[in-house]
Amino acid sequence: MALFDRIRLSPEAAAAAAAGQPLVALETTIVTHGMPWPENVATALGVEEVVRAAGAVPATIAIIDGEIRVGLSADELEALAKMTGVMKLSRADLAFALATRRPGATTVAATMIAAHLAGIRVFATGGIGGVHRGAETSFDVSADLYELAETPVTVVSAGAKALLDIPKTLEVLETLGVPVVTVGQDALPAFWSRDSGLPSPLRLDDAASIAAFMAAREELGLKGGMLVANPVPAADEIPADEMRVHIEQATEDALRAGIRAKAVTPFVLGRMLELTGGRSLTTNIALVRNNARLAGEIAVALQADGG
């Protein structure tokens, strides 16, 4: 089977691509592994509307019936959310899901691969994966970091997930040559919190500047993508000092329960929901919507610049 027989664009995404309209890729692990029902589907649909309001077209990506679906209907999103046995796909098992016709939700890495195949240059998510705590003995480092070094897609997130070892994550990104740009402030954000306590390597203040940076990297022939760290709105953040206590508790609970590899993040996010009395979910929804808005603006700015 030829590659492009594996990719199916929704009518909306296909029309946008044919007309040269800006598209923004969206992932689906937030639907299947990141949020509880029914907030997962409501958030996914709401994020799509935010992208449209910014002037771009959303393309939510998943693996269904042996195909890379680029753009899902509301009914397809709800069906995916209710499916059992949905794989959480990264670079290592994306092709496996296609070959075996297993349903799969895409992580940052898998969404970047699919977006690039579909010609989409901007992707909005909540937070990227990174270096897990204790990685010096577990070697647990997300494939997201290596995908950013390999695949030319700009990822808009609220930084790395705060449950990770953020200093080590930033060091790996620097080693891999991945630009990390924080929007509107000098401090690197930490998902639920605006300030991780670390300075950002780079700062830009608007979508047009980010689009210009992307264009300059392309002119130089530099491979890979870039990470845009977009701080959660101030009204929605949970301060880092408060979150640090909850993260340590949730991480200890995961260790005691023997949670490993891909199961760690969903487990910890679930515990964070309990420990914060639901506040972590409210903040998560706010930051995803904020990232979708910025990603839409970047996609529109790229089009205006002829990109």
Image: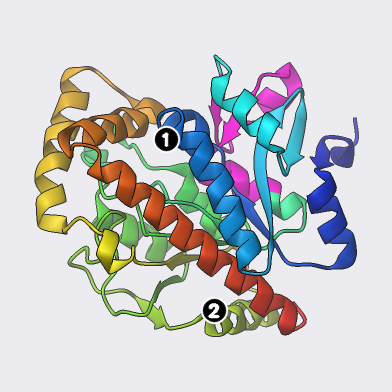
Write down the region rendered in magenta.
86-114
Q: In this image, 21 relative to 267: left or right?
A: right
Residue situated in front as seen by the camera: 256 or 31? 31
Q: Can you see residue 152? A: no
Residue situated in front as seen by the camera: 10 or 305? 10
Q: In this image, 230 relative to 216: left or right?
A: left
Residue 161 location in percent, x, y?
Answer: 33, 49
Under circle 2, the secondary element is: helix
Please identify the quarter of the rendering in which residue 139 is found: top left
Q: Amino acid at mark 2?
A: Ala
Q: Which residue is mark 1?
A: 34
Above or below, 226 against 134 in this view is below
**Mark before the other along the chain sequence, 1 or 2:** 1
Above or below, 52 against 101 in this view is below
| Residue 217 is a magenta residue | no
Which image quarter is the N terminus in? top right
